[in-house]
Amino acid sequence: MSEHPLTETMSATRAELLSQLADRICGKFEGAAIMFVGVDGVDGSGKTVFADQLARVLSQRKPTVRISIDGFHNRRADRYRLGRDSPDGFWSDSYDYGAFERHVVAPLRSGSNEYLTASHDLVSDELLDGPIETLADPSIVVVDGIFLHRAELRGVWDFSVFLDVNFAVSVGRMAIRDGSDPSPDNPGNRRYVEGQQIYLRTCRPQTHATVVIDNNDLSAPRIVGAIR
């Protein structure tokens, strides 16, 4: 049985690219301050695994922590206020960016060493006020998630990656991961595919990211947008 496509063993090409990114990030990191690194891309682009791997490489050089924007969803009633199948609702109502700012960005930027990794529990739909995490040292904070280059978040990132992946590939990966239909045109995928198409049209994340990476081939990701 083949491995899950998003958890395959890291290839030499992938390891080399991650090391190259880590060199650039560490070169910009000032040890007395927090540095936020965003890993963006459509669902199924490989963000979580890429961010995990990048954080592991970085942690060998600098203090590094991992957070996901998925810990900061809106509550269910807000997420589905436009209907459970609405692409506009997926784009506009999925996340509580104010909570991410209050519980992560603002305290760490202000010099506090306390933050939350989540403000909401997807299973229980309850809001969270803990556990409170503590940074031992100024750190590189690696955050993965969709929509990271929308206006509410664009200014957070000191360095950002956009993983550019075709919907045919990303939806196929989601089908393996979630048991969903592998076709981007399937009605069951409309909310997610069209919602993310709104993001790509509206925010043009490829033009804002520090670096754009073609991640269609997990074993051979490649830089397709110059590192700024």
Image (cartoon, rainbow, N blue to C red):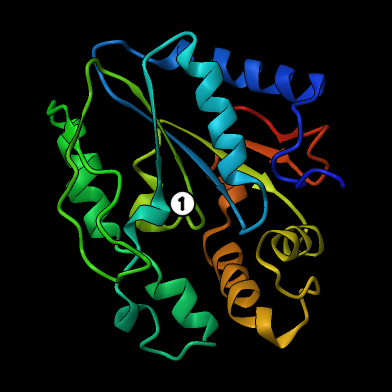
**Side (left or right) of 169 relative to 62:** right
Give the x, y percent position of residue 82.
41, 90
Residue at 59 percent across and 28 percent down: it is 53
Q: Relative to 123, does residue 186 appear above or below in the rendering?
A: below
Q: Relative to 137, does residue 133 appear above or below in the rendering?
A: below
Q: Quadrant of residue 35?
A: top left
Give the x, y percent position of residue 88.
49, 81
Outermost residue on the right side: it is: 1
Give the x, y percent position of residue 80.
40, 84
Outermost residue on the bottom side: it is: 83
Residue at 73 percent across and 17 percent down: it is 16
Dot 1 amino acid type: Leu
- Residue placed most toward the observer, 216 or 201: 216
Per the image, label 1 sits on a secondary structure element best described as loop
Residue at 70 percent across and 69 percent down: it is 179
Q: Relative to 209, does residue 90 appear above or below in the rendering?
A: below
How crowded is the residue under tag 1: few (<14 C-alpha within 10 Å), some, or many (20+)?
many
